Image (cartoon, rainbow, N blue to C red):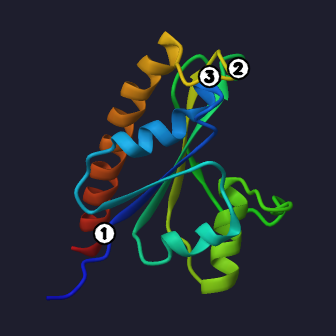
């Protein structure tokens, strides 16, 4: 019996010891999608470039300040060579650029940002973050299913 490659990878990142900053990891841990590999990490690192090379799509999940947006946002991503990996951290676009440079391929990708208000030391989420997590999970489920249908329509 062979190994079935995941259809998508979902990478949630953030610091779970800084309250709402841990939103991305919490979403990744709560995702219950078949054929989707969920990864929860403290930060994006160059080593994660390999995680998406054999998938049809990638989703990155992170917290954002409520001042940037008060709603869960989903934006499509493209590799961007102007976003350089500095030190041992990266943003999703620079990780896609690295994946493309190393493997000659990167999947279609999206960045899901969930607003938060409390980034102090602690593990408790604000009510806004808790609500945003549920919305993010729904949006990711929809994104994966919609992208799957679009891919099947293109292949037909």
Label pair 2/1, CB-CB below 8 angstroms: no
The residue that appears at 61% across and 85% down in the rendered structure is 104
Spatial separation of the CA atoms under disc 1 and disc 3: 46 Å
Relative to 151, say whether 67 is above or below: above
Quarter of the image where one finds residue 66: top right
* Residue 108 point in image, percent of width and height: 50, 63
The residue that appears at 50% across and 69% down in the rendered structure is 107
User: Is 63 on the left-hand or right-hand side of 67?
Assistant: left
User: Is 107 on the left-hand or right-hand side of 65?
Assistant: left
* Residue 77 point in image, percent of width and height: 60, 54
What residue would you read off at disc 3?
122
Label 2 crowd bin: few (<14), some (14–19), many (20+), radius 10 Å = few
Label pair 1/3, CB-CB below 8 angstroms: no
* Residue 70 point in image, percent of width and height: 59, 16
> Quick one: 126 or 132, which is closer to the camera?
126
Q: Is residue 27 visible?
A: yes
Relative to 138, say whether 117 is above or below: above
Q: Looking at this rendering, what residue extends furthest in the bottom direction?
A: 1
Determine whether the residue tagged by mark 2 lies in a helix, strand or loop: loop
What residue would you read off at disc 2?
120
For discs 2 and 1, the disc positioned in front in the rendered view: 2
What residue would you read off at disc 1?
154
Please tell me which of labels 1 and 3 falls first in the chain.
3
Label pair 2/3, CB-CB below 8 angstroms: yes
Relative to 111, say whether 64 is above or below: above
């Amino acid at each position: 019996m062979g190994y079935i490659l995941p259809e998508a990878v979902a990478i949630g990142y953030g610091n779970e010891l800084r309250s709402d900053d841990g939103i991305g990891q919490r979403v990744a841990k709560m995702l219950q999608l078949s054929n989707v590999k969920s990864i929860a990490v403290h930060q994006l690192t160059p080593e994660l470039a390999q995680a998406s090379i054999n998938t049809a799509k990638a989703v990155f999940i992170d917290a954002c300040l409520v001042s940037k947006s008060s709603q869960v946002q989903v934006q499509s991503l493209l590799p961007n060579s102007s976003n350089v990996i500095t030190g041992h951290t990266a943003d999703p676009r620079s990780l896609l650029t690295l994946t493309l440079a190393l493997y000659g391929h990167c999947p279609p990708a999206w960045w899901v940002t969930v607003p938060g208000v409390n980034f102090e030391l602690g593990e408790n989420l604000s009510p806004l973050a808790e609500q945003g997590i549920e919305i993010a999970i729904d949006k990711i489920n929809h994104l994966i299913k919609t992208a799957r249908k679009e891919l099947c329509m293109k292949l037909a």
